[in-house]
């Protein structure tokens, strides 16, 4: 059974998910008239609160919604995922991560516009948004089975087992060097219980507290990471043109990969971007659907900034740190340990501690937001009165993730996470003409106002 789960996870995160997310995203990119390029300035104006409406229905502001969405996406994928991309696909993989990010921006625009356009109510009468409500109210009852597939996969796929496991490994690698297996196990229990306690203080306060904490953590965590990498960049500033040239040349030649396979470079870059920014998975529409916004297109434009911040900004910072220090050429390390090696060379003595702080904040912020997504899926499946029990189940799995070596469970979580993309993307493709029509109407009204 374990081998079947691992094989399924590896298979679904291969061609099926790439065709769905990249193919669908490319369609959205063209169908929207290249909106990520044309309307970036307007999206930033919206984010600054220029058009906020406190009287609109919803529970949180659009800025808080974006912060919560980024809190879930800017995580270990930005630190370890980029290192994996460089190891497997060479520097050229970073270029294809950028391409996939712009495609992902178009996907987020469509899926999060629909989250406001087709909101519903839960069993307690509270307004809710997300792919399950888009399917119910946008596609009709005959498609309801897709809502159930999405939510069942979400309840499992949105557990924080992977984050807990990786964060524990980083803390042990940087701070603790145990003498025996007994000490290792004991330390993992202690770290797991501390993580569970920290997460509990935030998630038991509901989406308002999660969004409030996320909106404070996100600028801090991106800022500290940005500052740390800038120290490394300035140290090797003369090498930047060479590294950028390497990224662009390798993207189309694949010379850094065994056999010079350009196709494998594209696949590695696109896969890491899809895993990192979550565009098309269906998580971001669940939090953007709670935004105090009556304008679906406005919410879609704000949500569109998520993949830009996640992949174009944060992933590029990680890539520069690894490329400039050249650890990708000279070390056997992989994943988060490769990034750790880059920080140790780039900023001797304190570099590894700065990275550990970033990893800690990134992982915790992801844990906070994932709990909300899983809670929301439980709410839809079992009703608002029973959904609260999901949080306690979620908290227990954090300790389990910290303590155990869980290849099978992590593969199950990964596989279910990918399954969520299929109902979400089917609904978005089916309802894409509605977003296009709403977009035309919105921008014509904006032009009329500005005259």
Image (cartoon, grey):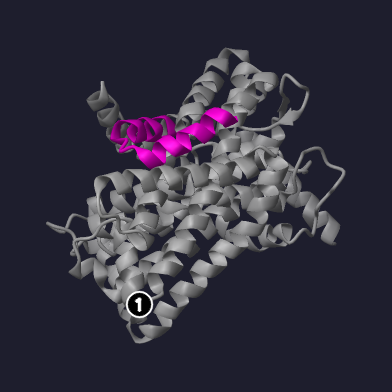
Q: Residue sitting at 50 percent across and 29 percent down?
A: 154
**Magenta stretch in the rendered image:** 391-417
Of all residues, the one furthest to the left in this rendering is 259
Relative horizontal placement of residue 165, taking residue 1 as reference (left or right): right
The residue sitting at 62% across, 22% down in the picture is 380
- Using residue 278 as the reference point, say whether residue 389 is left or right of it: right
Which residue does the image show at 62% across and 14% down from the upper left? 141
Of residues 87 and 372, the one drawn nearer to the viewer in this rendering: 372
422 or 360, which is in the foreground? 360
Eyeballing the image, is 10 above or below 212? Answer: above
Residue that lies at the very extreme toward the top in this rendered image: 142
The answer to whether any part of residue 281 appears in the image is yes
The quarter holding residue 93 reads bottom left
Query: For numbered disc 1, what is the local secondary structure?
Result: helix
Give the main secondary structure of the magenta stretch. Answer: helix
Q: Name the residue under label 1.
A: 346
Q: Residue furthest right?
A: 55
Q: Position of residue 415 (x, y in %)?
A: 37, 31
Is 133 positioned to the left or the right of 260 in the image? right
- Is residue 32 something that shows in the picture? no
Magenta stretch encompasses residue 407: yes
| Foreground pick, 178 / 48 | 178
Taking depth in this image into account, of 248 and 376 the one nearest to the observer is 376
Q: Is residue 341 left or right of residue 434?
A: left
Relative to 206, residue 273 above or below: below
Seen in the picture, residue 218 relative to 373 is either above or below; the reply is below
Q: Where is residue 126 in the image (x, y as percent from the top left)?
A: 77, 27
Q: Does the magenta stretch include residue 432?
A: no
Location of residue 60 in the rendering, given as x and y in whole percent from the top left corner:
74, 44
Picture residue at 49% right of the left edge, 32% below the top = 396
């Amino acid at each position: 059974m374990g081998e079947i789960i691992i094989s399924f996870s590896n298979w679904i995160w291969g061609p099926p998910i790439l065709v769905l997310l990249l193919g669908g995203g490319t369609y959205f990119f063209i169908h929207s008239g290249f909106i990520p390029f044309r309307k970036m300035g307007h999206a930033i104006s919206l984010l600054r609160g220029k058009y906020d409406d406190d009287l609109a229905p919803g529970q949180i502001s659009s800025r808080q919604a974006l912060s919560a969405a980024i809190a879930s996406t800017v995580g270990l994928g930005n630190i370890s995922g980029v290192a994996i991309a460089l190891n497997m696909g060479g520097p050229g993989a970073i270029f294809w991560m950028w391409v996939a990010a712009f495609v992902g921006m178009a996907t987020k625009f469509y899926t999060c516009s629909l989250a406001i356009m087709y909101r519903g109510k839960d069993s307690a009468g509270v307004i809710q948004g997300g792919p399950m409500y888009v399917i119910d109210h946008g596609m009709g009852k005959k498609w309801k089975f897709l809502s159930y597939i999405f939510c069942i996969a979400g309840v499992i796929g949105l557990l924080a087992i992977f984050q807990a496991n990786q964060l524990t490994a980083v803390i042990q690698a940087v701070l603790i060097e145990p003498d025996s297996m007994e000490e290792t196990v004991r330390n993992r229990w202690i770290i797991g219980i501390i993580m569970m306690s920290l997460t509990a203080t935030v998630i038991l306060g509901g989406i308002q507290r999660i969004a409030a904490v996320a909106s404070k953590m996100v600028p801090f965590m991106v800022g500290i990471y940005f500052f740390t990498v800038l120290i490394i960049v300035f140290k090797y500033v003369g090498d930047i043109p060479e590294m950028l040239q390497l990224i662009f040349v390798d993207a189309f030649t694949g010379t850094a990969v065994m056999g010079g396979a350009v196709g494998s470079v594209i696949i590695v870059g696109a896969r890491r971007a899809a895993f990192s920014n979550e565009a098309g998975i269906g998580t971001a529409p669940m939090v953007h659907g709670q935004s105090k916004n009556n304008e679906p297109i406005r919410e879609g434009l704000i949500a569109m900034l998520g993949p830009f911040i996640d992949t174009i900004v944060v992933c590029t910072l990680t890539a520069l740190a690894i490329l400039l220090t050249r650890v990708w050429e000279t070390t056997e390390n992989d994943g988060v340990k490769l990034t750790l090696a880059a920080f140790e060379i780039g900023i001797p003595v304190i570099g590894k501690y700065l990275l550990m702080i970033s990893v800690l904040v990134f992982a915790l912020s992801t844990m906070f937001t994932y709990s909300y997504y899983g809670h929301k899926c439980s709410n839809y499946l079992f009703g608002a009165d029973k959904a609260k029990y999901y949080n306690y189940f979620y908290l227990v799995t954090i300790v389990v993730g910290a303590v155990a070596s869980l290849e099978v469970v992590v593969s199950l979580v990964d596989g279910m996470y990918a399954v969520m993309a299929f109902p979400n993307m089917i609904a978005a493709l089916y309802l894409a003409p509605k977003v296009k029509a709403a977009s035309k109407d919105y921008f014509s009204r904006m032009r009329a106002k500005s005259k």
